Amino acid sequence: MPPRPDPGAPRPVLRTLRASDGPAAHRVCAVHPGALASGEWSAVAGRLPKDTAFHLLDLGNVPEFLAAALDARAPVVPVTALAARCLDELAAAGAVAEPFTLVGWSFGGVVAYEMAARLHAAGEGGAVRDLVLLDSIAPVPAFKRTDELMEPAMLLDWFAMYLAAKRGRPLTLGLSAAERRHLAAPEDGLARVLEAAVAQHVLPAGTELAGLRKLYAAYQGGLSRNNRSTAPYEPAPLDRALTLVKPAGSLLPDSGDLGWSGLSGRPVRQVDVPGDHYTMLRDPEAVGVLSGLLAGSAVA
């Protein structure tokens, strides 16, 4: 009987989710932000052509990055350091020997952008065939927010979206405009989230508010960590095309290209898909669009 894996052992940052059948004609490298399990990419990876390899860089397996979400006093890992770590992992595995598609989800898109910028600065910009960002918010002044400036109602909406994705069921929060205006802190609305989640069978009856508060604290810790990591990051624009994939339920549905036009010397290509920020890699229609996009086929 094989030995059981040590749950305390370091987990690999780079993993191959899909190996190609024979020599890879194309490679996709994805930067995963770590909020949900890395298995979220499985449907997209499974729809890629047989000659395409899919490599995943899981930021959640970077110990210092994880620690900064669990403890607000822990130092954050700068975006630049995360990008350097990811490039080192890819280079060590020989995954960048040929041009590849680089994709990042959410905060992972910010790291992917810095990876592309570093390759460009080193004269290796051609290594990235396509740069694809999945509902990532650009690290530009107009879109940066400290924790104190994040709107409570918006954070509560994001948490409800996240909770629904974790439970695999839709959840409609249904706060009125007046309730949204008078919400002083997201924690003040957690009782409403619990009420809605139980009524819509997202959480079982009898779920205690204290447990939901713990889950929200962990969720907010990750957001705060990302904000602190992004705050000092001031990237220069890249003279290259990039694609923003924006779901119907984007984190910022009314904010156009989420600021990326300020960091691209060329028009930003925006591709709209069904789903929301946390379910866009599960929705069958979105998966079809994403797999085609990452494989390099045209998108209508």
Image (cartoon, helix red, strand yellow):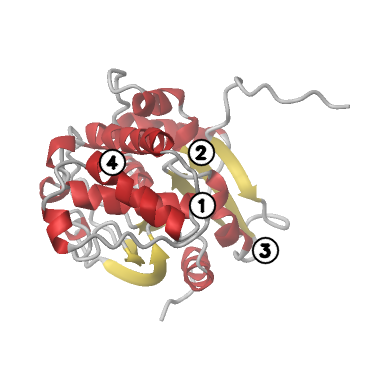
CA gap, disc 4 to disc 1? 42 Å
Q: Could you tell whether 99 is left or right of 196 in the image?
A: right
Q: What amino acid is found at the position of numbered circle 1 in the picture?
A: Arg
Q: Give the image location of residue 206, x and y in percent.
A: 49, 44
Q: Which residue is mark 1?
A: 167
CA gap, disc 2 to disc 4? 17 Å
Q: Which residue is mark 2?
A: 90
Q: What amino acid is found at the position of numbered circle 4 in the picture?
A: Ala
> Is residue 43 depicted above or below 54 in this figure?
below
Which residue is drawn at the image coordinates 45% and 53% (left, top)?
198
Q: Give the image location of residue 275, x and y in percent.
A: 42, 66
Q: Are marks 1 and 3 in contact (CB under 8 Å)?
A: no
For label 1, the SS is helix
Density class for disc 1 (Cα within 10 Å; few <14, some 14-19, many ≥20) is: few
- Whether residue 274 is visible, yes or no, is yes
Task: Give the foreground label among 1 and 3.
Answer: 1
For label 4, the SS is helix
Density class for disc 4 (Cα within 10 Å; few <14, some 14-19, many ≥20) is: few
Q: Which tag, 4 or 3, sits closer to the chain's start? A: 3
Q: Which tag, 4 or 1, sits closer to the chain's start? A: 4
Q: Which tag, 1 or 3, sits closer to the chain's start? A: 3
Q: What amino acid is found at the position of numbered circle 3 in the picture?
A: Lys
Density class for disc 3 (Cα within 10 Å; few <14, some 14-19, many ≥20) is: some
Q: Give the image location of residue 74, x and y in percent.
A: 31, 18
> Is residue 147 depicted above or below 75 in this figure?
below
Q: Are marks 1 and 2 in contact (CB under 8 Å)?
A: no
- Res 50 label: 3
Q: Please state which of residues 114 and 37 is positioned toward the viewer in this rendering.
A: 37
Q: Which tag, 2 or 3, sits closer to the chain's start? A: 3
